[in-house]
Every structure is written in structure tokens, then in C-alpha cells.
Image (cartoon, rainbow, N blue to C red):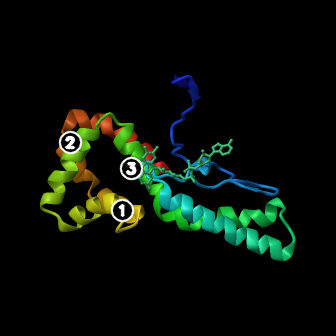
Amino acid sequence: MKVFGGRKVWAAPIPDRMIPKPYRERVMVIGDACGTADPILYEGIYQARLSGKFTAETFCHALDKEDFGESELARYNELLLKHLYEEDLRYSYKFHYLLYHSGLLERILEATYSMAQEDPEMMQSTIALFTGSESRKHSWEVMMSRKWKLIKLMGIKNSLKLFPTLVHALRI
Ligand SMILES: Cc1cc2nc3c(=O)[nH]c(=O)nc-3n(C[C@H](O)[C@H](O)[C@H](O)COP(=O)(O)OP(=O)(O)OC[C@H]3O[C@@H](n4cnc5c(N)ncnc54)[C@H](O)[C@@H]3O)c2cc1C
């Protein structure tokens, strides 16, 4: 909390993990509050709108059945998992962990850039991380199919540092 010109202003970081259960009886949580922002670029408008659409669809369904109980609203979570998490956010979490928790952000970017120079598929999937032209899952699979090259390019000292982070990211 800070005071600007006599007014109290609150701020909080954009949540970067989906909350495990974004629904309760008569309640659905959407957008940033639900943790749908992408933790690579911290963009969240598209996901907020999509989660709003899923909420509306679930609401209409519940209205037809006159049932706003938890088991009916669980449908909302299924839509989120299918359309936002499974192909994209889950893999954004992996990239996030690798890039921001390894302490090797610059080195990983350099190695990725170097690989992409002579590897069109790597180039395309790296660009897709910024443009969204391919799923995060695809970009992750392309990078992981070249993980030994990445490790080699990082050098022994950095690779030893990278390894536990990579193992953790693979398990997400
Ligand atoms: C500086 C900045 C730049 C960004 N740039 C991008 C970008 O380029 N592209 C992109 O995709 N995303 C970007 N984002 C993220 C994006 O803004 C959010 O992911 C998106 O706005 C989330 O939408 P939302 O509806 O979930 O939440 P919000 O847009 O935050 O809407 C929540 C609303 O609830 C209101 N509210 C809060 N508490 C209460 C309360 N108690 N009672 C009543 N109302 C309340 C707030 O005032 C706010 O209007 C950016 C974020 C920031 C901070």
C-alpha cells in the first residue's frame, strides 16, 4: 500500500499460477483472480476473456438445470483445464521455471538464439513464445527434443546449475 496525493493505493503482483479450485457453490473465479495470466510474458487479457466466456457457458447450462451446485459448476474448471491449461499454461509454467528460477535467463536465451540460427523449427517455436502462433506445448517439445544440445551450449558450470531446474520443470 502507498499513499499518492493523500489517496491510499493498493497493488499486488499478477498471480502466475491457476488456483486449484476456481469454483464453489454459486461462485466462479475468472481472469487474473483465477491465475490465468501467462507467466512467461505476464499477459492475461485473452485468458481473462476466455475464462469469462467459459463462465457464461457454464452459467447458462446451470440456469437451464436450475442447479448452481459445485458439481454443476465443476464444468467451468474442466473447460479451463482443457482449453487453457493442458496445451498452454502448463507448459508456460515449465518455461517460467526454467527461465526465471534457474538464474540463467541470459545464458538460456543466448543458447536458444544460437540454436535457432541454424534450426528453422527451433526459430519458429521460439518466435511462437512471443506471438502465440503455436501452443506452448509444441514450443516446449521442440526445445526438449534439443535439450542435450542446449546443455552442451550452456557449458559445464552452467549445465550443472541448470540441471535441477530442468528436472523440476519436466515434472510440472
Ligand atoms: C502494466 C500492465 C500491463 C499489461 N499489459 C498486458 C498486455 O499487453 N497484454 C495482456 O494480455 N495483458 C496485459 N496485462 C495483464 C492484463 O491487464 C490482465 O491479465 C487482465 O486485465 C486481467 O483481466 P481481469 O478482468 O481478470 O482483471 P482486471 O482487469 O484487473 O479487472 C479486475 C477489476 O476488478 C476491480 N476490483 C478489484 N477489487 C474489487 C472489489 N473489491 N470490488 C469491486 N471491484 C473490484 C478492479 O478495479 C478491476 O477493474 C498487463 C497488466 C499490467 C498491470
Left/right placement of residue 101 relative to residue 142 reads right
Mark 2 lies on a secondary structure that is helix
C-alpha gap between disc 3 and disc 2: 23 Å
Q: Measuring 34% from the left and 40% from the top, which residue is drawn there?
A: 163
Residues under numbered marks 2 and 1 in contact, where contact means CB atoms less than 8 Å apart: no
Tell me the kind of residue under disc 2. Met
Is the shortest distance between ligand 1 and the CB of mark 3 under 8 Å? Answer: yes
48 up-or-down from 93: above or below: below
Mark 1 lies on a secondary structure that is helix
C-alpha gap between disc 1 and disc 3: 19 Å
Tell me the kind of residue under disc 3. Leu
Residue 154 is marked as 2
Give percent across and percent down for residue 65.
Answer: 85, 75
Give percent across and percent down for residue 50.
Answer: 56, 65
Q: Earlier in the sequence, mark 3 or mark 2?
A: 3
Location of residue 164 by image quarter:
top left
Using the image as rendered, state which of residue 43 and residue 104 is in the foreground.
43
Residue 41 is marked as 3
Residue 141 is marked as 1
Crowding near the residue tagged with mark 3, few <14, some 14–19, many ≥20 C-alpha atoms within 10 Å: few
Q: Measuring 84% from the left and 61% from the top, which residue is drawn there?
A: 69
54 up-or-down from 23: above or below: below
Q: Quadrant of the N terminus?
A: top right
Crowding near the residue tagged with mark 2, few <14, some 14–19, many ≥20 C-alpha atoms within 10 Å: many
Q: Measuring 43% from the left and 50% from the top, which residue is drawn there?
A: 94
Mark 3 lies on a secondary structure that is loop
